Image (tube, rainbow, N blue to C red):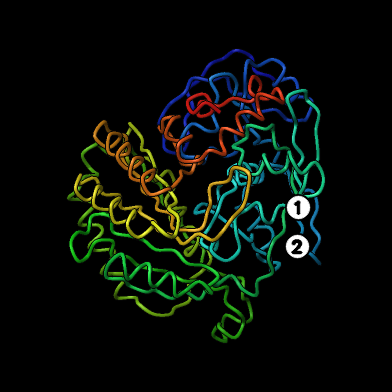
Amino acid sequence: MDGAPAGKREELSGWGRFPRVETTPCAPRSDDQFRAALSAASGAIARGNGRAYGDSAVSPGATLSTRHFNRMLSFDDSTGMLVAESGVLLADVIAAFLPRGWFPFVTPGTKFVSMGGAIAADVHGKNHHKEGSFGAFVEWIEVMGADGAVTRCSHTENADLFGWTVGGMGLTGVILRAAIRLRRVKSGWIRQTMVPAANLDAAIAALEQSLDATYSVAWIDCLATGAALGRSLVMLGEHAALDDLDPARRGAPFATPRHKARRVPIDFPSFALNGFSVAVFNDLYYARGKARAGASLVDWDSYFYPLDAVLEWNRIYGKRGFAQFQCVLPTATAREGLAELLRAISGAGAGSFLAVLKRMGAQDSRCSFPMEGYTLALDFPASPANLALLERLDAITLAHGGRFYLAKDARMRRDTLHASDPRWASFAAMRERDGLSPVFRSAQSERLGL
């Protein structure tokens, strides 16, 4: 539906398909239509491409799609500065500029996230330990506030609004346009080094020894136990230079294989993902990775976005959907906390085959997720038993001084959030003070008291 909300109610969800929220959707095509939509709605939230996992981009009032704000407005080829509307996807940016030798400084695990969503969640990637989160490369943002006025903000201009908007989950206003910096690259290839790690200690050691690597990430077997607890495949990466390519590729360094996307055609039955099937997958995946240990060249799409090759992969979890758990633990408590989390998961037999461990760097920001330490992300089918397990994982995270990623959250309690991260109390107070809370509301903000 375009324009202002017209009263037709629909159910929407995030990428996890859990929970489902009744809302009034609309898709404004101009600033004026966004103003009209905000004025007509009893609370609204902007929504990019719907890749937040839970209920942060759907509102019980109106959900305002930015899909028509999909134009790239200007690009400076001398600095890599791109000005674009908030509905532009990172996939669009890569398609337009990688052939010209530019790539996003920071990217999450999917290229199908919108620029506005990347800013609102202040997404991080495989290089946070070295280069920080998406917001570090945002030059300025234009935000429509509760009164319909559009304000440009940056680190130096309206800096208070900028600080709250980067990582503010769309709750400071509608992000309409932004300027971001891209990085120069010499090819579309990544020099990958695969490091098998026999257990959690080995995985942490490998990541700590690789802090100079531009990219690092580990797939972690969350069902392994005993001496193999936390066995992992650590994948390091660098943008390949021309000298890294064989002569046949040097003539066209940005020509990489086109991967034919496969689609999950049906919702899997609820019994398909269980402890046994995940354990078998994990054994095979670890063995395959171990056999490929060492250095190799991989194309950018395979390194950064392996899941994007499977369209609608969220259907693997069945009609009930799934919930992701993602926490970050400070360096001092990370090893002990991660081991306790993994023991709880393996003990419950509720392993996730999409389990990721990353080293995070230091970050000082208003409300963004990252802090120095280790982040663990896992997906679980949204069954009553798994939701109860997630409560246990929350408690373990709190006990070790960790906090939680709202872009992945679908079910956390408000007392858990506020106990883990007191910054959100200041955020809620700012929203109340500036008259934002009645206008910009998501199902998540209402659940968490933001």
- Which percent across, then down, holds residue 253? 61, 75
Quarter the C terminus occupies = top right
- Of residue 317 and residue 139, the one placed in the foreground of this image is 139
* Label 2 sits on residue: 80
| Picture layout, residue 215 above or below residue 253 | above
Asked whether the viewer can see residue 1, the reply is no
- Of residue 55 and residue 311, the one placed in the foreground of this image is 55
Secondary structure of the residue carrying numbered label 1 = strand
- Which percent across, then down, holds residue 200? 31, 64
- Which percent across, then down, holds residue 215? 52, 67
- Of discs 1 and 2, which sits in the foreground? 1
| Picture layout, residue 284 above or below residue 57 | below
- Mark 2, Cα crowd under 10 Å, few <14 / some 14-19 / many 20+, is some
* Label 1 sits on residue: 139
Please give the name of the residue rendered at 79% of the width and 57% of the height, measured from the top-left corner: 75
Q: Is residue 250 left or right of residue 217?
A: right
Please give the name of the residue rendered at 33% of the width and 60% of the height, measured from the top-left corner: 220
